Structure formats: structure tokens, C-alpha cells
Amino acid sequence: MTVDMSQFYEVFFDEAEELLAEAERLLLGIDVADPDIEQLNAIFRAAHSIKGGAATFGFMDMAEITHVLENLLDKIRKQEMALTNEHVDAFLAAKDVIKMQLDGHRHATEVNAEQVGDVSMMLKSLSEGKDAAIPADPLLEQFKPEPEAFKVAEQKPVIELTDADKSKGLKLYDVGLPEVTERDLSNLKDELALLGEIAVYQRQNNAFALMVKTDSSADDIISICSFILDPDALVIHEVGASDAAPAVTASPETSQAAAPVGDDPGYGFFDDDPIIAAIEPVENLAEAKAAQAPTAPVSGDKVKVAEEMGYGLFGKDGQEKQEEGYGFFAPFKPHPDAPKAQMIGDETPVTAAALASAPTAVIAPANAADDRRTQPRREADKAAPQSAESSSIRVGIEKVDQLINLVGELVITQAMIEQRVNALEPVENEALINSVSQLTRNTRDLQESVMSIRMMPMDFVFSRFPRMVRDLAGKLGKKVEFVTIGAATELDKSLIERIVDPLTHLVRNSVDHGIEKPEVRRSVGKAESGTLTLSASHKGGSIVIEVTDDGGGLNRERILAKAAANGLPVNESMTDSEVFNLIFAPGFSTAEVVTDVSGRGVGMDVVKRNITAMGGNVDIRSALGYGTTISISLPLTLAILDGMSVSLGKSVYVVPLNLIVETLQPRAEDLKTVTGEGLMVHVRGEYLPIIALHALFNHPTEITSPTDGVLLILEADGKKSALFVDRLVGQQQVVIKSLETNFKRIPGVSGATIMGDGSVALILDVPAITQMGQTTNYVTGGLAFANQNYSTLDKHINA
Amino acid sequence: MTTTEISNTQNNNTVSNLKTAAGEYLTFVLGNEQYGIEILKVQEIRGYDAVTQIANMPAFIKGVVNLRGKIVPIVDLRIKFNLGKVEYNEFTVVIILNLNGRIVGIVVDGVSDVRELREEHLREVPSLVTRIDTKYIVGLATIEQEMLILVDIEKLMTSDEMELMDTVVH
């Protein structure tokens, strides 16, 4: 059992963490002056779900604070109090505290009880302080529940349908309203007053409802309401039509036997905490019955009790009970489709009556309601993508990796079969060849689908930053507007995880050093509030992530001076790009003040190292006074590569396809030299250095003149060069295997792969080869790659 | 391609005490000498096949092979220690070692036997200047008038001189 419980814990922890992240995202996005009611509702739902889960699993500390949080949120979303920045700050603080508690439960980390208490107090005082300050609206005041009555039951409607009314053909309607503003409510009241006698009362969940006594039909009410409200959001119920139970009035002497009795406990039963309510249904009911229905058979048999309860729960006011019923299965919010399910209330007592014991009866009607509500709920899901939990499953990453590895092996095996089959006589084996080409397609599709499991949108990374930027900007007294572009761009999960730290450094740096203080910005004629942009986009076979600020830009002179002071080899003739790249040197910081945010000079070198380790590049563009862009380019995935296989002597090497600009066989007149060595090729007006792979790798081959072989024009780090190999073999996707698992890093080689025949081919590390080519003189026919060069290069590559 | 799986069964008194070095050993031939390595370090024995050469490596690192999807480096101990005749044919034997999760293949002249060595077989190594540093030699053993050189293969293969591991560059 313990094992089972812990499994559920994990699910709760995961969900709670997601909900917290979601709530934080919404809080940061909210416009304080004019909050979107949907966003407030979503935040409320998140808090509510966490509370429910925490209470279920016995994390009472979390349930407690979320309860306080929920109360305040509830008031705000009902527009009982206006949202202020103070509230948002308090909510964010509460989120942090809940996260801390969550981590406390999950990883047994320390929980700062004082902080919890502080936040809880802050929320409570906000919640209460505002309550008193709210101006008393006469209309609202009239129907506001008594504070004591608030917990027990809703304010009772004040109209009854008498027998005399019935004979006159009057009907009594109960109109449940969605969240409305006071003005709308007042308008609605005036409009409906034209139909007959009306009264406004407040339901237990604080929503307003109207009682209308009229001879018009429900449709008339809807059409009148539709001028003011979305008619779909109305819940209209004819009182006394189905169960002949007149609406309950506030005066006890008018309450009658069975049905009304059920009614009242029903309300009391579902107070605003469905979880607690669900735990003790029987007691609640029994008490309520005893207290309010002296005429009912107190010692009644169980079936009778269940029946009454069924009425109580779903009789008169089915809609409302259903909502609460949902509350204890899953977070639920009334939605526009609600009226469709309204009729269920009339049927559920049958189900309830058939059941013997009271607690079962509570669940059964709710289940019945659930079934019937599936359809409208699905529609609601479409509209609200964040509630799409049912369409995804949680799987351990190691399972996915295992799947990917297996598919990788399958691809290799498939390639092997394909190669064997292609060697067969095509006419005789046509059927086999066709089947194999079908297999090839299927394998490729399978591989793509499997790889896409690991792909995650950049949003996972980007969503962490709004909060950080907000806090940082607040701490540093700066105004920063944070913009993200291309958050839907997908990237391999392993890369997503590894990009977080470098990006955090860069964003911090931009806020701290990039964007100036408001007064400085004003003095140079910029808007007071700086803009920090995080963008992600696909560019060829890689993803480009850019951190852009419109701040002061990098100061070339200062960087040079600092570099010289740090003993780095610099000179005035360095290009801007080379100068800017100096900030990636370890221990380099030109910040005048070391803050606790940044400026210690650790970070940028780590950023560079992390990104290089991922197979990516960092580039800086900056203009003094106008801002800085740090651009990171990363491969889409680490596992698979589109490659061009080339031959050299008897060996085959793989060159990443995305780095090949073109391939050509040079004419002798295109080959040029400088001082008799340093061979270059003249391609479309450019002179590109030729790097002979056989010379670089000291590899025996018969083809030593570029005119006999093939030149691959490669582009790496913004520089072009021509790699000289024997032949092109073909283009194929290869699964990258690490050489380091059992061996070590080899200069000029980024990994290995297994070819169709089962042999190993090395994948060339193009940036490293380009650099190696620059440090070696090319002499056709083979200058051995000197060993000391080799070790310096190794350092270079590992740095 | 011949692949012989060697069962990794062990009896109770193996490895528990490396000092006495008693236990089961796989013995192989390099030139005229008999060597022994701890059997538990051996994963399998296979033929020499389809080795992909790697640029700018010392001569004894023959390259890498595909061992059921894993890329495994192959070291020729005959070249490293300048013993025996270096030729590659269908009788060339590669011992695949599993050294704490790291898989490495070594080429030797031939695999002879699996021997159980008890304490009374073992002798101290005298101070010598040899191609294999004596710190990698656990001891000597005499079996049927022949001398067996017991090598701490893990220590040897992970040493800097084998150049199989990344050295930390700062």
C-alpha cells in the first residue's frame, strides 16, 4: 500500500508543480488595471486543485495556505475587491511558499515556517482589510448573506409559488446567473421586473440568482437576459415543476416534510470545501435532518435516507449540486454548456433511491451526472487547451530513451537489409525490393515519430523568465518589459534542460548590465522601460535562441582595456566580434559594481562552455548605446544527424549535412597558392582554404590532388573552407554514438555511427577541422599533423 | 566471427582479497610469455574484424569496432609491448574487457585457458625494468613449470600510457 500511495504522491507533486508554474505564468501576464476574468478564474482553479490534492494526500500545511489564497482569489474574481499590485505580489509570494512546501514534502528540503506564516498573514489581512473597505451597495447589501449563515446555507429566495398563483398559470423560475457585475445585475433586475415578481438572492458560492414569478416561459426569460448576459451561461430552472417542492423560504415554519428537508441539508452539506464535505457526508446529512426536519422519520430506513439525500443533492437545484459534485472529483468550473445538463437533477433521485447506503448515493448521482456531462465537457476542453490533461500521459524519460535507442538499432538493421537487397538482381527480386523500400519509409516515419516524443516547446524554458526578470528588475530599480518570440519552437528535451542555465545567466546579465536604469535611459532619449527579448527560431538544421536587450551595448574600449589588464592577448586591430567574444573568457567582467545578481565574471565562460558542449555556438552582436544580442545556435537533437558520407582511402567519414554549402570538383586553374603552399580554391569570387582530410588525419589514399577528388565547401563559425576528400558516398541519416563512452574525445571527430554494413564510421567535427586546417599548412600529399599542434588544439576544443 | 561467451560464475574466494590475488584467471599468450587476467573483467572473446582506423592515434590503438551497437576501442597489446608477430587473420583473438562499465578490446596472440590460482601458486614480483611497469603486475604464478604473469588489467588499461582515456585538460 505504501508503494501505491507514493506513486500517487508523485502524480500530485508533478501536477501541483505544473499548476504552480501555470498560476505564476498567469499572474505575471495579468493586467492589474483591467484583469481578465478568465485568467483570474484559471488562477483560482489552480489554487483550488492544489488545495484539493493537498488535502486528499494529507499535506495539511499546503491545504491551509492554498485555502487562504483561494479565499482571497475568490473575492477578486467575483470582483468583490479590485486587483492591485499588492495582491499580485502576495500571490507570487504564496506561490513560492507553496512550492517550498511542495519541495519539502517531495525532497524533504527545509521549509521556512516563518515565511509560510508571514505569507499566510499577508493573504489574510489583504482578504479582510479589503472586505471592510468595500462600499456598501444597497442592492448587494440587501441580499448579502449573514456572516454566520454564510457557511451553513445560502440566502433563501423570498418568493413562493402559492396555490393561488398556480391556478393563475404563474410559474416560479430560479435563474442562476454567471458572474455578473453589479451594474448588469441591476439592469437585469429591472428588465425582468417587467415580467412579474422578482427577487435577487445570493447563492452559497457567492453567485447571484434570481427568483422570477411570471406567466411567461423560460425562453422569454432567456431572451430578455440575452441583452445583458451570455444566455448560455444562465441556469434556468422551474421551481416546483418536477418535484413539486416549493422553494424554501427563510422562515422555518414554512418548511415542509421530505423534499424541502433534503434541500436544506444539501446546501449545508456542500459548503465551499467539497473535499471536507465529501469525507463526512453521512454525519452532515443526519445532523441536518435532525435539526431541520422534525417531521421526517429520523429513524428511517437507509433507502429512505438515500432517497431524501438524492433530492437534497440534486432535486431542486440540480445544477449547483452537480458543480459541487464535480468539485470533489476534479477541479470544475461552470461553463456555458451548463444548462444542457440541468435536467439531470430530476433523474438522479431514482439512482439514489436504488442505492442502499448513503455515501454511495452521494457518489452515484455525481457519476451519473458526470457521464451525461462528458459531451459538453469535451467541448469545453477544446476551448481551454490548458485542461487537456486527459490527452497526454506521463512516461519516464528512461522509457522514451530506451525506445529511441531501440529504434536507432532498428534503423541500422534496416539500412543493412536495404544494402543487401540493393545488391540483388532487381528484376528477379522486384517484390522483395519493393517491400524493403516500404520498410525503409516506415522505419523513417517511426524514427521521426519517436524522436518527436522528446521534442518540447521552448516555452518550457521561456516560461521561467518572466518572474525572474520581474524580480530582478524590481531589485535593481529598473523597468524591463519582457517579450518572448517563438515559444512554440521545439527542441530536444535533453537540450531544453541543458539550455536553462546558460540562458538564465544571459538574461540576468542583460537585466543587470545591459538595460540601464530609467533615469539613464531618459537622459539618452530612450523609453524608460527597457525591452528584453527572448526569441527562438529554426534556421536550417539548428535552432537559434537569442537574448536581445535595448540597453547600453558592449563597450569595445572597456573590454579591451579589461582584457589587457587580465593579461589576455589583445590588440587594437581585433574585429568587434573577436573583442566581444573576450567576455566569454573565464573571470572576465567589466561591471563596475559586483552585485549579487552578476558581475563576478563567472558565468559567461560557463555559458560558452555549456553551449559548446551541446554542439552549439554563441555569437554576440552589439552596438554601443543601442543594445546587445547574444545568439545561441544549437542542433535540434543530439541523437540523429543528417549526414553526407565521404570516402577517404578505404575509410568512410560522415560530414554533417547542414554544414555543407556545396560540393564541387575543382578545375586546376581554380587552385591557387600563397608562397607555394597554403592551397586555396577560387569559388564564385571567394578564395577558400583547402583542408586536405588525408593530410590532416594522416590517412593513406591514392588521391592527392584536389582535381581528382571532391571539395566540400563547409561553413562553420561563419567561416567557409573547402574540405578535400576522395569521393562522395551518399547522404543518409545517422545515429550519433559517443566515442567517449568507452574511449575518448578525438580531435576533429565529434562522434561515430554505425553504417549499413555494421562497420563504424567517424563523424567529422567540422568547426574543429576548420580550426585544425587553419593551424596546419596544407601541402598536397601530406604534411603530418604535428603533435604539439594537436595538443594545443585539443585544449582549444575542450575549452 | 567467432564469439565465445565466458560465463561469469565465480567461486567464493575470488576477488574478495586482491592482495593474495587468488582466484580464476584467463590466461593468454603474448610472444613466448603467458599472461593472466582476472576472469571477472572479461566480457567475451571474439575475432578481429572490421576495425575502423582513427586518425593520429598511436600504432597500438587499432581503432574502434561496433560491438552490438556500442563503439569499442581496440588495443593491440602485441604492438604496445612489442611481443609476438603482428598479423591479422581469422585466428587473431580479441578479448573484450569490461572495466567498470567501460568496454575495451585487446588483441593478443592467443587465449589459452581459465585457471584457478590458489595462494600457494603465487610469487612476488622482483624489481625489474620491463616494458610493462611492474606496478601493473600483481604477481607471478607457477603452473606446470610455466610462469604466468598476472596483470592488473584494469589499472593498466586505464593508465595514461594506454591513451584510452581523456586526460583532463585545463
Image (cartoon, rainbow, N blue to C red):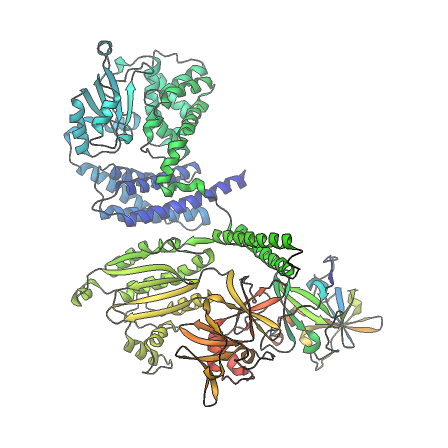
Residue A328 location in percent, x, y? 40, 32
Q: Residue furthest front?
A: A427
Q: Is residue A176 left or right of residue A739?
A: left
Q: Is residue B3 left or right of residue A371?
A: right
Work out whether A292 lies above or below A698.
above
Res. B170 in view:
no
> In which quadrant of the rendered view does residue A437 lie?
bottom right
Residue A686 location in percent, x, y? 40, 79
- Residue in the picture at 32% in, 27% down: A339
Quadrant in which the N terminus of chain B appears = bottom right
- Residue in the picture at 34% in, 11% down: A295
Residue B50 location in percent, x, y? 66, 68
Res. B129 in view:
yes
> In which quadrant of the rendered view does residue A121 lie?
top left
Q: Nearer the viewer, residue A532 or A711?
A: A711
Q: Residue furthest right?
A: B144
